[in-house]
């Protein structure tokens, strides 16, 4: 169902969606959570590029409020002086996704930004419903600030991870960590639990992230709509660090991302807003299936590198 408007779709996106929508068998939201997680890993192996060469990839566990939290540290240099460090929270509706599904993207971010990237493997619903994920992300970020040599933090994540980026930034705005957050980079973030958006109606079917899948995520995660961590768009944004917010043109979450960027600007937050036209939610993990995603990733990270350089000058 659409509003009657013709929406631009890139040729490689159209081809990928045609392939995806022709697949038979159960969809993510028709499987138990464990099986859906495995399906996302397999899809990533087919639809994303390999990790590529990188000097350092280190798996560690750090203490969390409910047990150890796995992290993965990427660095394009074998050693370096302390500087900014990116903390990355993966997407997947707070139910699926892990260190493996976003491994190629995190390696590419480390290469382009020329800074360490620390990916956080927070607890997932339904085994650990809201607010386990934001609690883990805040705790991990505070630990990273105190224990990983750095001069400042850059927080980033996609989709659910974009929500966790904003939630963590708000927490550290109000109660700072031992190092400052110098910039944040939410990628097609979820910023509210309500779905009354035109982009939901336009792109809720046939564009990878479906209305049924979003409902399935929401039912498992069981977020409190009145909680700032679930609906940051309903709470003050003043005092957040410089922000690069990205949306995708064919994404059900597009309009809420646009609205949050406007909220940031209204609040006086130094904000750069970019929309990747003609592409879909999840593209940062689809760089093999959608080759043009590589340019989107490179373009955004190049802008982020400049924002961080300005913020730390």
Image: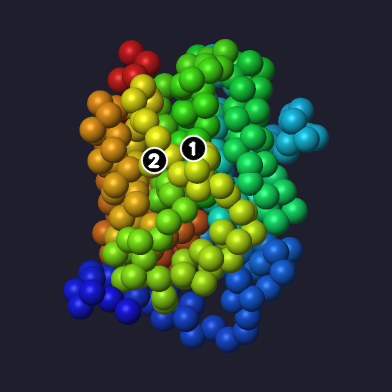
Does residue 187 appear left or right of residue 120 in this picture?
A: left
Q: Residue at x 34, y 52 (%)?
A: 256
Q: Residue 115, image x and y in percent?
A: 49, 28
At horizontal 19% and vertical 74% (from top left) the residue drawn is 5
From the viewer's perspective, is residue 286 above or below residue 63? below
Find out whether the residues at labels 2 and 1 contact each other: C-beta distance under 8 Å.
yes
Characterize the local packing of mark 2: few (<14), some (14-19) or many (20 or more) Cα atoms within 10 angstroms.
Answer: some
Q: Position of residue 214 (x, y in %)?
A: 51, 64
Number of numbered discs present?
2
Q: Residue furthest right?
A: 67
Foreground of the two, 271 or 220: 220
Furthest residue toward left? 5
Where residue 228 is drawn, which disc sits there?
1
Residue 2, compared with residue 244, is above or below; it is below
In this rendering, would 220 be left or right of 152? right
Q: Is residue 277 left or right of residue 298?
A: left
Work out which quarter of the rendered image holds the C terminus and state it: top left
Q: In the image shown, does 2 or 59 lie closer to the viewer?
A: 2
Residue 77 occupies which quadrant of the picture? top right
Asked which secondary structure carries label 2, the reply is: helix
Label located before the other in sequence (2 or 1): 1
Q: Quadrant of residue 76?
A: top right
Q: Nearer the viewer, residue 100 or 211?
A: 211
Indicate which disc residue 234 carries: 2
- For disc 1, the neighbor class at 10 Å (few under 14, some 14 to 19, many from 20) is some
């Amino acid at each position: 169902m659409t509003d009657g408007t013709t929406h631009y779709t890139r040729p490689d996106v159209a081809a990928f969606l045609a392939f995806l929508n022709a697949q038979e068998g159960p969809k993510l939201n028709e499987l138990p959570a464990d099986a859906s997680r495995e399906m996302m890993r397999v899809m990533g192996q087919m639809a994303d590029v390999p990790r590529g060469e990188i000097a350092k990839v280190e798996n560690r566990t750090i203490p969390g409020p409910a047990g150890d939290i796995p992290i993965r540290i990427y660095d394009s240099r074998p050693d370096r002086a302390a500087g900014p460090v990116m903390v990355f929270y993966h997407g997947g509706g707070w139910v699926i996704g892990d260190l493996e599904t976003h491994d190629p993207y995190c390696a590419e971010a480390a290469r382009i930004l020329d800074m360490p990237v620390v990916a956080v493997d927070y607890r997932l619903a339904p085994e650990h419903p809201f607010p386990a994920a934001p609690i883990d992300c805040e705790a991990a970020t505070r630990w990273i600030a105190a224990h990983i040599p750095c001069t400042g933090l850059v927080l980033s994540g996609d989709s659910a991870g974009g929500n966790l980026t904003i939630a963590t930034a708000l927490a550290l705005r109000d109660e700072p960590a031992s190092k400052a957050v110098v910039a944040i980079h939410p990628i097609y973030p979820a910023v509210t639990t309500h779905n009354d958006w035109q982009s939901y109606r336009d792109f809720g079917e046939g564009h990878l992230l479906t209305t049924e899948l979003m409902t399935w995520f929401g039912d498992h995660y069981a977020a409190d709509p009145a909680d700032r961590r679930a609906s940051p768009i309903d709470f003050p944004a003043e005092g957040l660090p410089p922000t690069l917010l990205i949306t995708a043109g064919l994404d059900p979450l597009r309009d809420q991302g646009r609205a949050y960027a406007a909220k940031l600007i209204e609040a006086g937050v130094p904000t750069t807003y970019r929309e990747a036209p003609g592409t879909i939610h999840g593209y940062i993990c689809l760089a093999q299936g959608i080759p043009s995603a590589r340019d989107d990733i490179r373009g955004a990270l190049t802008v982020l590198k400049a924002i961080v350089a300005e913020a730390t000058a």
